[in-house]
Image (cartoon, rainbow, N blue to C red):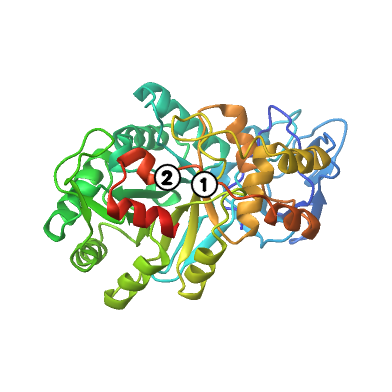
Amino acid sequence: MITSLRLDLRNPERVPYGLAFRVIYPRGAHKEEGEEAEIGGGGNWWRWGWIGGWLGRSDRGARSPLPSLEIKARSGDFAPLVPSEVSNSVWFSGFWCSATESSAVPEVTLSSCDTTMPVIGMGTSSYPKVDPETAKAAILEAIRAGYRHFDTAFAYGSEQDLGEAIAEALRLGLVKSRTELFITTKLFASFAERELVVPAINKSLRNLQLEYVDMYLIHWPFKFGKVVSSMPVEKGVLLPLDIKSVWEGMEECKRLGLARGIGVSNFTSEMLEDLLSIAKIPPALNQLEMNPLWQLKKLREFCKAKGIHVTAYSPLGSTGTKFGGNKVLGSKVLQDIAESKGKTTAQIALRWVYQQGVSLVTKSVNKERMNQNIDIFGWSLTEEELDEISRLPQHKTITFASIMGPHDVVLQVDAGL
């Protein structure tokens, strides 16, 4: 479903194929209520104006009554376009009406917390960390591009930047209320003890300047015996996780209204089995490294069978970080498919993740790439293309042992992912 749409009446934009307006005309307008017009097509640059109460293609604009609008993608449902999302320039003649589907992000319903989550999110981790002003500017640009899910973690050191950017977005009117955003953060391994979980989320909430997060995840399936500020972790500090006691703390976060949903990250199927055997509130999702070169088919099948949604991080292979690589974007198979469809290689990789029924967290501080990365809806990969991607040789980008050291519990996690 389209959650929001920007109509820019000053700068014509490309109208995506398969986008439809349902125009609900005010009393006294020329057309009957419910008149529907499908617009766009074939990647053409089409100009549309308000002509005597009718949304149509024309060479000149004209003053007209202001209808209300509903909009949908070809495969979705109509959703209202609220007046605040329409530029007041609509009242004047000579302005062209244009639409973009960049914010037409579908949502997935998370079973154990009865909430919905946008299927694409913007990550805020960076290695090395970007400066706060760059981080905040990138978040604001992402909101303008249509992103509404933002993923952070105490470990990233980006919660405060995100919180300040959210406050600024509200001040600027880029979003009308906190409820338009879906915010995920994660429990740091130094706080992975029953009595430390609620204080940890409260610390994150202070950083974020929020009263609640939409999703709170256990970041890693192990804990640190003391506060850790650098990697690799020294021997004897990285320890097995007491999942029962820690999950009780996570459930308390949900009961207190500090988190609307709770879940995990980097959990193997065996670890999920252990968690499900004691959980009063099942995990809503498992966030994992996943991309066309690391497809996790068995683990995804397990999660689906248990009603646990999967979110992919590093869907492009963490290119540009010291932990990642360029193997995904350098894939000849993905490049050839991209060329044949007039898409970027990144769009092919992200669309592949989405067509697996998996949500994803991507990352960029570049405006053009942000817009490209969210433009993965309204088109699809063919069965032949999906089959070709499914046969790609597999290569895991990130191993925890390479980051944290070859601890027994870390090697166990790496072996199960």
Using the image, determine if residue 138 lies above or below residue 374. Answer: above
Please say whether residue 219 is visible from this viewpoint: no
Cα–Cα gap, marks 1 and 2: 7 Å
Q: Nearer the viewer, residue 129 or 235?
A: 235
Taking the spot 25% from the left edge, 61% from the top edge, the residue there is 257
Please say whether residue 365 is visible from this viewpoint: yes
| SS under mark 2 | loop
Per the image, the residue denoted by label 2 is 399
Using the image, determine if residue 55 lies above or below residue 255. Answer: above
Q: Amino acid at mark 2?
A: Thr
Picture quarter with the N terminus: bottom right
Mark 1 surroundings within 10 Å by alpha-carbon count, few (fewer than 14), some (14 through 19), many (20 or more): some
Taking the spot 86% from the left edge, 43% from the top edge, the residue there is 42
Q: Which mark is residue 283?
A: none
Locate residue 181 relative to residue 79 in the image: left or right. left
Locate residue 148 relative to residue 33 in the image: left or right. left
Locate residue 348 relative to residue 339 in the image: left or right. left
Q: Position of residue 307 (x, y in %)?
A: 46, 72
| Label 1 with label 2: CB-CB less than 8 Å | yes
Q: Quadrant of residue 368?
A: top right
Per the image, the residue denoted by label 1 is 396
Q: Amino acid at mark 1?
A: Lys
Q: Position of residue 288 (x, y in %)?
A: 45, 53
Outermost left residue? 195
Q: Position of residue 259 (x, y in %)?
A: 29, 58
Q: Position of residue 122 (x, y in %)?
A: 48, 41
